[in-house]
Amino acid sequence: MPCRSSKCTKRRNDSTQESIGAKHTKTQDPTLVTPPVDIHLDLKVCLDAIWRAFYLKLPEEFAFFYEFCRSLNHNAPLDAFGKSLGLRLVGPFEVINKNGKLPEEQSDIPLFYRYFHDPPEVVTIMVGSDGWHLGYFRDRPNDKPSLIVESEPEKSGTLKIVGTSLFAVVRSLLAKRSPFKRLISSMDQFIKDKKYTFPESNEVIKQRKKCCVCSTLNGIGLVVPLNGDIGYRPLEMTYGEYILRVYDSFHRKSSNWVILLMAGLLPVKIMVGCDITGRSAGSH
């Protein structure tokens, strides 16, 4: 497993960037598909190792997707989409590729492929050569990822929801590139043989949006479940006001925004403190 070199990704001027579609367009012949391979993996050991490494519970399709990649490139499944899309499987896929074997030093594994703007809810699973990456997203560590997000750290720190199934997302990327119809057909046949059905993407995204309590700078929104009526407390300023104050303070190189922000946080802290005190008193 590589070091977390992604933290040192250099940023270039936005004007020099091409679209992701153009960057990942390849003209080589499609990847030749070999017959499916019998995979001897201890899946439980792999999933336990991934949980210890990334605090990530994985959806059913994770193992299926890795198996499909093994059928494309038995010797280097992590590079199954290297020629076609210029992408490599990383993170949890590196763990399953080593049959659950982890490095001796595990304390910084959650930081592998964590880009500067990525929140803890994101675990990177596919990367390109330009910093573009796909990641599993879940709102709580104990939740299985319900979303696939993409990010271009050299352009912005925003996260874009691209789907709920890795098969569907990668198939969509392949469909935009005409030379890879054979690869798409192989994926469709594999999914059919496994009798795997995609989750209802629009419904999952819609339901999560209803649960968002506020906007976030990365654009993904924040979901905070209530526990005994204690949960998210809004700031005493709108999201737009907060953004304007941050930008204004940044351009003025002033620290006044910290004072203003803390002033907005004070009522929230008081409310939370009262709630906790009230609950503690009621429990005696």
Image (cartoon, rainbow, N blue to C red):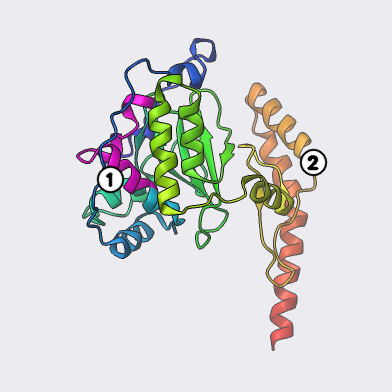
Q: Quadrant of the N terminus?
A: top left
Asked where in the image residue 73 lies, by quadrant, the reply is top left
Q: CA distance from mark 2 to mark 1?
A: 54 Å
User: Magenta span has 71?
Assistant: yes
| Amino acid type of the residue that numbered disc 2 sits on in the rendered structure | Thr
Q: Residue at x 44, y 36 (%)?
A: 115
Instruction: Name the residue that disc number 2 marks.
Output: 238
Measured from the top left, where is residue 249 in percent x and y?
Answer: 68, 28
Residue receiving disc 1: 36
91 and 239: which one is in front? 91
Q: Earlier in the sequence, mark 2 or mark 1?
A: 1
Nearer-the-camera pick, 6 or 70: 70
Residue 211 spot, x, y in % from top left: 71, 54
Q: Is residue 7 visible?
A: no
The range drawn in magenta is 65-84
Determine whether, in the image, residue 167 is placed left or right of residue 27: right
- Residue at the (67%, 51%) spot, across then down: 208
Give amino acid for label 1: Pro
Point out residue 61 in the picture as x, y percentages from the top left corner. Answer: 44, 52
Left or right of 24 in this view: 228: right
